[in-house]
Amino acid sequence: MQSSPGCPAPLLPVLSAELARLEAQLGQTADRWARAHLAELGDAAAARVLRVVAETGTRVRSLSAFINHLAKQEAMQRNAAGIPTAESAACCNGPSARASQEDSISGPFYQDVVQMEVQNQGPNGEMAFARPNHARMEPGSPVRQMPFRYMELNILERIVNESEEPSPLDFALLQSITENFAEKKEIGSGGCGTVYKGILRNGVVAVKRLHNTRTIKDKMFHREVKSLFSVKHPNIVRFLGYCSFTKEHAIPLGGRIIMADIRERLLCFEYIRNGSLDQHLSDELRGLEWQTRYQIIIGICRGLHYLHKDKEIIHMDLKPGNILLDDLMVPKITDFGLSRPESDSLATTTRLISQGYTAPEYISGGKATSKSDIYSLGVIIIELVIGSRTKPNITKAIRRWNHRWIKSMKQSSLACQQVKKCLELALRCIQDDPTDRPDISDIIDELKEIDTTDGQAQIQISSCCLEDILGIEPLEIRIPFEDFKISHSIELTNDTDDYIAFVTKAKLERFCTEPDRGIVPPRSKCSVTLAMQAQVNAQPNVHYTEVITVLSTRVDGALSVDAMDVTSGEIFVDKEGKVVDEVDVMVVFGTPQLAEE
């Protein structure tokens, strides 16, 4: 076959022969060495040897992919030069052409790789690393690094496509796809590390760089990696690979040079676009619909069941920030920063506390079991149902959800029962005594039972739960700085056959309401005017949020507004047979800062 100018054809036979030689040598060497020495080693050493062999095999497969890339380049160059061959026809007229285009290096990150290929071409178009130029082949030279980096990139992209299992990753690759861990690529941070967005040709990954200022023992890091390698479940974030890298730095200290080891530890995961659960939490009257929240609760429980029962792993830091939501709002548990096997459930001196979610026995004594995760799960369920971590009033929660369903014409007795069951389970999960908390299998069984006819019959909903409450619109008011002197209004709607009394309270008292109390007759409306207090000094580019709380309850129609003793609090106190509803209206003043993408 004739070579055309600009084609690296002479390189391909050399690389193909080298690939075949490496494959054969790898198999023969591993086989001979295993027979001679494997029996002499312990399990740990044998595992390390086999891992090295597997990694070498991965490099060989990467070389094969690199040769295929060069072959496609050659075919396209031959076609451009007007040499009609079967290879060029196949490359330029069919699926192979499309595959070649898809495999082409593009995007800002890959420009340096493309530039390297152009700069390192010889006068006849051959690649410089194919020529016997020893200066170009020095260790650390860009020409030596480029093929290796390209092969590493291929490995990661195949892992993303699920055509290859997770594996060790090169630090330089992770550094490159995050643009040297640029601040603009940062998508989150926590007690253990910072997460960056990494850009590939076939998608996006999340790279977690563990803080090197925080001492993370080898045992803890290896335990985390081991846990990540072993898990695979629809409700667990998919692990792609890891990097453990140490470099020496010369640091001047007191007239001397100290050689310090800088340790880098990184974990690579699939990228989940909808962010973490804590970005989607709100009360019953706004935000996610109930069925979305309920499916999130089910998904979290399934993921935790997999960890506890299938893998015997305790998460130890379960919270909304460690639960990600994909494009379909499917929850995926992540960040096993302190995860450990259930068999290791002993007291530990290394503790990372997430306030509000961590079990009391872990806070006080460092003792963690699977029931510690159950406590965290209970808090998360409460927050998903009512939007806060406060101990829930089940009756009020159902009333508020029912009001939302009435407005949207989606009222459902099954949904009411699901809300009640979730809160009842959550209250059992947050018991101080771990033995009083349910097992994750019991939680899933009870949730499944709700969806059966028999299970629904067992849950009784009191009539007061199904009473409608005072409607309030809007639930959020945004006031630009230019409009701070303009008054705004809140509309209260009574769609019931009863009289409903109300009172408004501003928590920070930046705004005043008129009237601040009243009685709304049956089937009628009342408008409340909202204005900024005269003494408040509004400033441009200042952003703050005020919460106006509206308390409401049913009253006797004979009661007058003047007779309402608001100061004593008698009217707006929960009593037997009387429920006081609370609704928060969010007033956002000024233009909030835009969050970086």
Image (tube, rainbow, N blue to C red):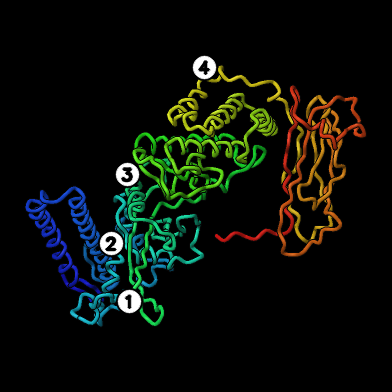
Residue 209 in the image: state x and y as whole percent.
Answer: 42, 60
Q: Amino acid at mark 3?
A: Ser
Q: Amino acid at mark 2?
A: Cys
Q: Is residue 346 visible?
A: yes
Report which residue position mark 3 lands on.
230
Q: Amino acid at mark 4?
A: Asp
Instruction: Between residue 317 and residue 270, name the one nearer to us.
Output: 317
Instruction: Between residue 479 and residue 221, name the one nearer to us.
Output: 221
Q: CA distance from mark 1 to mark 4?
A: 71 Å
Q: Nearer the viewer, mark 1 or mark 4?
A: 4
Report which residue position mark 1 lands on.
118
Q: What number is the disc on residue 91?
A: 2
Q: CA distance from mark 2 to mark 4?
A: 63 Å
Q: CA distance from mark 1 to mark 2?
A: 21 Å
Q: CA distance from mark 3 to mark 2?
A: 40 Å
Q: What number is the disc on residue 29?
A: none
Instruction: Pick whichever of labels 1 and 4 is earlier in the sequence.
Output: 1
- How packed mark 3 is, by other alpha carbons closer than 10 Å (few <14, some 14-19, many 20 or more), is few
Tell me whether circle 3 and circle 2 mark residues in contact (CB < 8 Å). Answer: no
Report which residue position mark 4 lands on.
454
Instruction: Between residue 541 and residue 424, name the one nearer to us.
Output: 424
Q: CA distance from mark 3 to mark 4?
A: 38 Å
Residue 583 in the image: state x and y as whole percent.
Answer: 73, 39
Residue 3 in the image: state x and y as whole percent.
Answer: 19, 73
Instruction: Pick whichever of labels 3 and 4 is earlier in the sequence.
Output: 3
